[in-house]
Structure formats: C-alpha cells, structure tokens
C-alpha cells in the first residue's frame, strides 16, 4: 500500500484532456488527475518532423488499477498511437497514499 502509480498522456485539445481526467476520476480508476499545458511537442510522424501544441494529463492511481486505467485512456484517446506512460512511485506522504488507495476503490 506504500506504492502509487502516475499514468501520463498528452492530447491536442484542452477539452479532451478535461474529459479524460474527469472520466478516470469518476470511474475511480484514478484518485486524481491534473491537466497542464499547453506544451510544445516535437516528434516524427509519417516520415515528417511535426510540432504540436498539447496538454498533459497526469493520473494518480493505485497499482492494481493501472491496467484498467490504461485501457480506458487508450479507448477514449483521439490519437492513432497515444503516448501512455506509467511511472511507479515509491514512498511519499503516507496519508496521501492511503487516501489515494481509498479513492480508487469502486
């Protein structure tokens, strides 16, 4: 119960980021979600160098909810190949960790 996960994705519209964040928290797949941006992302796509303005969504969740959260984000994501990164966090404020685990229970 000491461990939490942060799942991160980016999208090209603030409204889409807000919908992803709200859906994850409403379904209790994430205890919280933060939307930040815009940020400028540069990447290769279809043999071209692209630069796009994007918004980042960071979801905080319990390890046993990661797979379902990733599945939900993937299904709702507008990108053909969405970036969905999972980071494992060891430690932190134990009260916050306990709260996070409580909030991700259906």
Image (cartoon, helix red, strand yellow):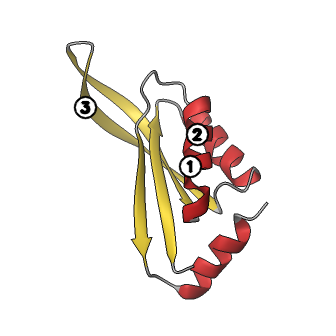
Which element carries disc 3, helix, strand or loop?
strand
* 100 sits left or right of 63 in the view: right
Q: Residue furthest bottom?
A: 94
Q: Is residue 61 visible?
A: no
Q: Which is more N-terminal, label 2 or label 3? A: 3
Question: For residue 61, what is the image quadrant?
Answer: bottom right
Say which residue label 3 marks.
42
72 is higher (above) or lower (below) than 85: above
Quarter occupied by the N terminus: bottom right
Task: Count residues near mark 3 (Cα–Cα under 10 Å), then give few for <14, some for 14-19, many for 20+.
Answer: few
Eye-nearest disc, 3 or 2: 2
**Spatial distance from mark 3 to mark 2, Cα to Cα?**
25 Å
Please tell me the numbered disc located at residue 12. none
Residue 80: give x, y in percent of width and height: 45, 21
Q: Residue at the location (61% across, 34% down)?
A: 15
Say which residue label 1 marks.
67
86 is higher (above) or lower (below) than 5: above
Say which residue label 2 marks.
71
Judging depth in this view, the residue of 52 and 69 nearest the camera is 69
Tags 1 and 2 touching, CB below 8 Å: yes
Q: Residue at the location (38% across, 32% down)?
A: 53
Task: Count residues near mark 1 (Cα–Cα under 10 Å), then give few for <14, some for 14-19, many for 20+.
Answer: few
Residue 36: give x, y in percent of width and height: 47, 50
Which element carries disc 2, helix, strand or loop?
helix
Q: Which is more N-terminal, label 3 or label 1? A: 3
Which element carries disc 1, helix, strand or loop?
helix
């Amino acid at each position: 119960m000491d461990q939490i996960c942060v799942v991160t994705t980016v999208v090209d519209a603030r409204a889409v980021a807000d919908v992803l964040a709200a859906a994850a928290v409403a379904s209790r797949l994430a205890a919280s979600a933060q939307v930040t941006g815009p940020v400028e992302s540069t990447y290769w796509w279809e043999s071209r160098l692209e630069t796009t303005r994007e918004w980042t969504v960071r979801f905080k969740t319990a390890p046993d909810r990661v797979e379902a959260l990733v599945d939900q984000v993937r299904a709702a994501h507008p990108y053909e190949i969405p970036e969905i990164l999972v980071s494992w966090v060891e430690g932190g404020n134990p009260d916050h960790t306990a709260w996070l685990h409580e909030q991700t229970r259906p």
